[in-house]
Amino acid sequence: MKINEGKIARREFISATAAAGITALGLSSFAQKFSEGKNIRVGLIGTGSRGCGLASLIKEMPGVELAGCCDILPEHLKEGLRLASPGAKGYSDYRKLLDDKTINSVIIATPLFLHHAMAMDAIDAGKHVYLEKSLAYDIPQTLALVRKVKESKLVFQVGYQYRYYGLYHRVKEIISQNWLGKITHFECQYNRNSNWRNPVSDPKLERVINWRMYREYCGGPLSELCAHEIDMVNYLLDSHPVKVTGIGGIDYWKDGRDTYDNVRTIYEYPQGIKASFTSVLSNAYNGYGIRILGDKATVEIQRDKAFIYAEATENLKGTVDGVSGATVKATTQGKPVEIVFKKPGEEDVEPTTFALRDFFECIRTGKKPLSNAGNAGLSSIAIHMGNAAMDTEAFQTWKPEYDIQW
C-alpha cells in the first residue's frame, strides 16, 4: 500500500484493496438453488466493527458458513477469522476472495467509496450480495449499480435493516389506517456526542481507520447516520423527495476533518410533506428519533419502541383578562400510548438479524429482498442531494433521470 504523509488518494486506497484482477464469471454458472441441506458459503469483505458485528450474527445462523474474510488491516482480518467458520480463508485482496468459486455470496461492509466497485465486481463474479448502506458514493455510481443489479439474476440486498423491523411495519399500518390524519411533517434526528474518531496505531493509517471523517471516502453524517431515517421516510410514504435544502458545518470538532460535524436538512415530498433530518456530533440528547406529525395524532419512534399522541381538541375555558369563555390552557397533545408491534411469542432480536435471515432466505427461495437496489437507490440519491444542498447552499431538485424503475 502506498501511503504519502498520512494521506491516501481514493484511487490508491482502491488499488490497495483490489490489487489483483479477476476473470468475470458468467451469471449462468451460478444458476442454482439451495436445498435445505446445502449450506450457503459467505465471504465477508471488510472486517471492521460493522463487519465483525455481522459475522457474530451469522455465526448463530444454521445453514450458513462464513467461509472467507477480507480486510487490508491484519488486526481486523484476524478478528474476522476468529468469528468465521472452521477452515475459513483470509484475504487482503477482495478480488481473490471473489475468485473462490465455493463462495456463493458476499457481504460488503467497507467504506462507502468502495461500495460501487466491490459490488459491481461481486456481481460479475456471480455472487449474491449483501451491501451495507448506503448504496454508492455518488449519484452516477448509484444509477450504474442499480442498472447492473437489475440486469443480473442475483439476490442483492442493502443493509437498511429497519425495513425488516416489525416496529416500522406497524407504524406504516397505522398511517394507512389514517390514525394520524393528514401527515404534514417528519422530524428526524440521529445525534451523538462523539468526535467519531477511532484510535490509530500508526498515523499513516489515519484515513484508513477514520474514513468517515473525510469526504473522499463517505458523505459524512447524512450518509452514515441519517441514511436510515431517510430510507424510513421513503418507506413510510412510498415515495421519494422532490427537493431539498440544508446547512451543515464543521463548527465543533476542529481536528482536520472535512465532513460536517453537524447537518440540518429539509426535504419536501409530494403533497407538500416536509421531512427534516438532523445530526449533531456534539450532543446526544434523545439520540435517535423520528416524529410523524398529523392533524389527528403524532407518532414518536425511538430505537425499539414507539408512542402515539392524540391531538387534543378540548381546551380548558374560563375568564381571562375579563373575557369570559377564553382559552385558559391550550392542550396540544394527549398522553402517550405505546404502540404494540410484536406478535405473541415473537422473538426479541435486533433488526439486523431479521435482515440477514431474509438475505439467506432470498438466496434459497429466489424471492426479492425488501431492501433492494431499487429503494436503496432512491435513498442514496436523496442523501447525495442533501449533501449537495448543504455544499452549494442552494435547493437541489429531483431530476427525471433519478426515477428508478424497479
Image (cartoon, helix red, strand yellow):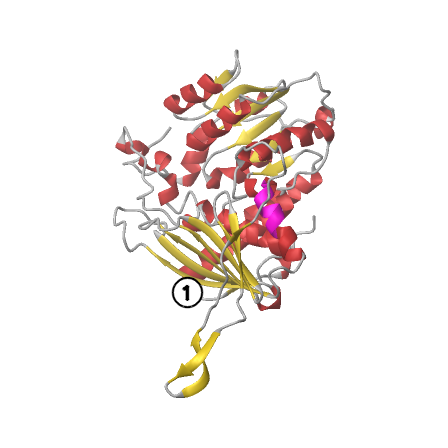
Report the amino acid beneath label 1. Answer: Glu
Viewer-proximal residue among 297 and 33: 297
Residue 383: in magenta span: no
Give the quarter of the figure containing the N terminus: top left
Disc 1 packing (10 Å; few <14; some 14–19; many ≥20): few
**Regarding mark 1 in the picture, which secondary structure is present there?**
loop
Q: Which residues are magenta?
A: 165-171
Q: Quadrant of residue 118?
A: top right
Q: Residue at x 35, y 34 (%)?
A: 209
- Residue 339, percent from left and from top: 56, 49
Question: Could one spot residue 253 in this view of the protein?
Answer: yes
Q: Residue furthest top?
A: 87
Q: Is residue 77 above or below residue 180?
A: above
Viewer-proximal residue among 270 and 99: 270
- Residue 358, percent from left and from top: 64, 33
In the figure, is residue 293 to the left or right of 393?
right
Q: Residue furthest bottom?
A: 322
Residue 170: in magenta span: yes
Q: Is residue 49 above or below residue 275?
A: above
Q: Residue at x 45, y 34 (%)?
A: 14
Q: How many marks overall?
A: 1
- Residue 4, percent from left and from top: 30, 35
What is the chief secondary structure element of the magenta stretch? helix
Which residue position holds label 1? Answer: 393
Question: Could one spot residue 143 in this view of the protein?
Answer: no
- Residue 174, percent from left and from top: 63, 54
Q: Quadrant of residue 158?
A: top right
In the figure, is residue 401 to the left or right of 395?
right
